[in-house]
Image: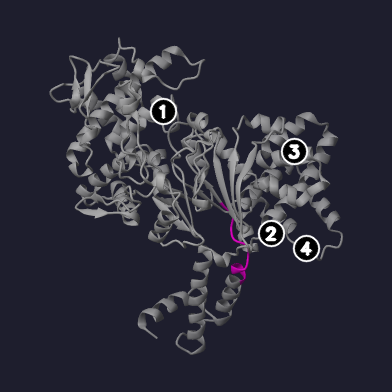
């Protein structure tokens, strides 16, 4: 036996010091391989819409309703099933609602009936898990009782009496509410084993920080970064162009409270600067997405802050483009194309009149230089982002649990696209001194993004990595952006819609071609016969008849409009994809109205199955990525067993 292998087996022997223990683990792992595969839940483009997102997670995209149906079928009426579902989604609120509506005697009976029903649903939800996995899902306070109730206890002849005694005691000790909350939490965990978030948690909506707080408590989550995530990652790394973009988007969508209240970032210096600089400027081109009943004075201030940070952004981006000529973004240098006296701009040889001609902080002779006040402001904001503990915690979590793509269980997950030329070939992109395409392009961009956040020793690589995050956010060759330009300036300052068009990458035109899709799957070493591409980024125009399913089911674009800003385009409020042992199910959702509607009126978010792809045979753990890892562990343990039995390693027990 080679020394290296022997050294590895000796290390493994510290965990399994005897033949008996090695055999027990092999038997255990072999049994797990034959369990049904885990349930995976895919979401994309959440954009801070925390109420809609968290409700869909609580419901498992309809999985909990399905479990209730499986357990009770025709034995419960529709109203009782809805009431039970609401109890599982929002246990604390539902219990309090029932307490108010019922007499004390009826309420005690309701407790007992509800506990029986919850245990039945929990049993159904836990059926495909090992005892060990189930035990890890149980809350410490009730783990013993729940494990006992969920097990098949054949020693108890009168099981009904046994359960009733437990439930009566829980109710008598005034712990029923806490127990119901615990069971509901377990059910929510069990119906979705792994959560894939395919990009864009941040921007537009009011609660990305709330979503991140929740996801940090999730036991099994991964991220495929979207461009809106990466710009926040760049901001947290201290890239000033990214910081300006993050603040501008927060101002535009009237969500500055995310920065101020959610992350505690002080925007008073920006407000003071904006009031002083744009005091008499109505800033009409910088309207914000405000509610009709919004405070007009506050909206006016937000518009001034919006313009102030936008002008700073254009300057900072110009500086970045000039210091990184290899980014090939000179066409986005626009401030030097303005005739400030005439109030016009020339783009690609065509002159346009500007909608806003007031640029008090721009020096026409050096338009990309920050004024002294702007420089001071950005230095303060940069320090606030770098020193924001909560933001840094969230961004580290994104780095630790995420990447630009993931290959998992024969599915290829990424947010945007794989840059292609007009013929469907992988487009060659220069990063540094080399050209990259396909998977290598993803890999090198992720490598530098991590350098931009983590690198401490090499300052040049650290700075380059920070700039790469801005490149990923907005460059036409970025796989998570996938458009020829980001026409932010044009949308603010030019009325002509033609110049505002952001043409999509050839990818979006060519993904109906099986040859192109198969080449992408091969490039990422994904099984062409079984594999799917799952991505978001481009809202699906459902209202216009567009389907999220492309290339005969091989590609699924699951951006269905979580963001309220896109629901007019999509006509729905988001897609989720469920992949369990029986196959794939793509679900569309209607808008979540309120928690009160679910609890009081027992109105659930209506979900429709868009496609259902049923497996010929029920998939097992052994067919999955987890199964591959378990098989490797079994192989290693069998080698250890052989080493024990041939005397190469001695048992310790």
Distance (Cα) linking label 3 and label 1? 38 Å
Q: Nearer the viewer, mark 2 or mark 1?
A: 2
Give the SS element for disc 4. Answer: loop
Give the SS element for disc 3. Answer: helix
Distance (Cα) linking label 2 and label 1? 45 Å
Q: Which residues are magenta?
A: 31-40
Q: Nearer the viewer, mark 3 or mark 1?
A: 3
Work out whether mark 2 precedes mark 4 in sequence or the reverse, and give the earlier one: 2
Q: Compared with residue 224, is residue 331 higher up or lower down, i.e. above or below?
A: above
Tag count? 4
Contact, mark 3 vs mark 1 (Cβ under 8 Å):
no
Work out whether mark 3 precedes mark 2 in sequence or the reverse, and give the earlier one: 3
User: Which residue in the structure is indicated by mark 2?
Assistant: 127
User: Which residue in the structure is indicated by mark 4?
Assistant: 153
Q: Residue furthest left?
A: 365
- Which image quarter is the C terminus in? bottom right
Q: Residues within 10 Å of mark 1 (few under 14, many from 20)?
A: few
Q: Residues within 10 Å of mark 4 (few under 14, many from 20)?
A: few
Q: Nearer the viewer, residue 157 or 295?
A: 295
Q: Compared with residue 148, is residue 32 higher up or lower down, i.e. above or below?
A: below
Q: Nearer the viewer, mark 2 or mark 4?
A: 2
Residue at 76% in and 44% down: 173
User: Which residue in the structure is indicated by mark 3?
Assistant: 83
User: Which residue in the structure is indicated by mark 1?
Assistant: 260
Quadrant housing residue 157:
bottom right
Distance (Cα) linking label 2 and label 4? 15 Å
Contact, mark 4 vs mark 1 (Cβ under 8 Å):
no
């Amino acid at each position: 036996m080679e020394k290296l292998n022997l050294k590895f087996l000796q290390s493994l022997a510290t965990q399994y010091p005897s033949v008996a223990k090695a055999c027990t683990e092999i038997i255990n792992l072999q049994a797990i391989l034959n369990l049904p595969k885990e349930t995976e839940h895919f979401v994309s483009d959440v954009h801070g819409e925390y109420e809609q997102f968290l409700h869909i997670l609580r419901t498992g995209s309809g999985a909990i309703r399905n479990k209730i149906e499986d357990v009770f079928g025709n034995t419960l009426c529709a109203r009782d099933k809805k009431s039970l579902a609401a109890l599982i989604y929002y246990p604390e609120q539902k219990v309090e609602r029932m307490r108010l509506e019922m007499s004390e005697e009826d309420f005690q009976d309701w407790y007992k009936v509800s506990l029986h029903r919850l245990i039945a649903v929990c049993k159904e939800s836990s059926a495909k898990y090992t005892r060990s996995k189930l035990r890890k899902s149980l809350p410490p306070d009730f783990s013993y009782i729940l494990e006992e109730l969920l097990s098949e206890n054949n020693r108890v002849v009168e099981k009904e009496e046994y359960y009733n005694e437990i439930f009566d005691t829980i109710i008598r000790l005034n712990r029923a509410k806490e127990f119901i909350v615990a069971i509901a939490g377990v059910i929510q965990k069990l119906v979705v084993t792994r959560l894939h978030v395919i990009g864009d948690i941040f921007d537009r909506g009011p609660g990305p920080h709330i979503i991140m707080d929740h996801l940090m408590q999730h036991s099994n989550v991964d991220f495929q970064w979207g461009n809106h995530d990466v710009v926040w990652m760049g901001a947290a790394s201290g890239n000033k162009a990214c910081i300006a973009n993050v603040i501008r988007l927060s101002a535009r969508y009237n969500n500055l409270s995310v920065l101020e209240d959610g992350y505690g970032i002080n925007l008073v210096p920006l407000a003071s600067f904006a009031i002083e600089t744009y005091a008499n400027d109505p800033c009409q081109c910088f309207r914000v997405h405000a509610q009709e009943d919004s405070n007009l004075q506050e909206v006016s201030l937000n518009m001034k802050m919006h313009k102030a940070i936008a002008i700073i952004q254009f300057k900072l981006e110009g500086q970045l483009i000039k210091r990184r000529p290899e980014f090939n973004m000179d066409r986005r240098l626009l401030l030097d194309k303005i005739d400030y006296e005439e109030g016009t701009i020339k783009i690609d040889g065509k002159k346009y009149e500007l909608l806003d001609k007031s640029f008090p902080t721009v020096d026409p002779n050096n338009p990309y230089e920050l004024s002294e006040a702007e420089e001071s402001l950005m230095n303060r904001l940069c320090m606030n982002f770098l020193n924001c503990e909560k933001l840094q915690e969230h961004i580290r979590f994104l780095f630790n649990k995420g990447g630009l793509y993931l290959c998992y269980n024969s599915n290829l997950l990424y947010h945007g696209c794989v840059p292609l030329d007009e013929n469907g070939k992988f487009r060659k992109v220069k990063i540094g001194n080399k050209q990259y395409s396909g998977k290598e392009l993803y890999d090198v961009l992720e490598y530098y993004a991590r350098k931009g956040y983590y690198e401490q020793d090499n300052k040049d690589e650290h700075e380059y990595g920070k700039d790469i995050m801005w490149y990923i956010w907005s460059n036409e060759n970025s796989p998570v952006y996938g458009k020829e330009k980001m026409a932010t300036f044009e949308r603010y300052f030019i009325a002509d819609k033609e110049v505002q068009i952001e043409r999509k990458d050839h990818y979006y035109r060519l993904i109906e071609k099986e040859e192109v899709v198969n080449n992408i799957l091969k490039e990422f070493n994904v099984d062409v016969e079984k594999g799917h591409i799952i991505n978001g980024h481009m809202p699906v125009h459902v209202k216009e008849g567009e389907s999220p399913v492309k290339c005969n089911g091989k590609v699924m674009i699951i951006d269905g409009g979580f963001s309220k800003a896109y629901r007019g385009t999509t006509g729905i409020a988001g897609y989720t994809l469920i992949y369990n042992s029986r196959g794939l199910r793509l679900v569309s959702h209607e808008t979540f109205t309120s928690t009160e509607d679910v609890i009081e009126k027992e109105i659930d978010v209506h979900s429709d199955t868009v496609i259902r792809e049923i497996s010929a045979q029920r998939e097992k753990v052994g067919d999955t990525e987890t199964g591959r890892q378990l098989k490797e562990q079994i192989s290693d343990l069998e080698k250890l067993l052989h080493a024990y039995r041939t005397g190469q390693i001695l048992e310790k027990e």
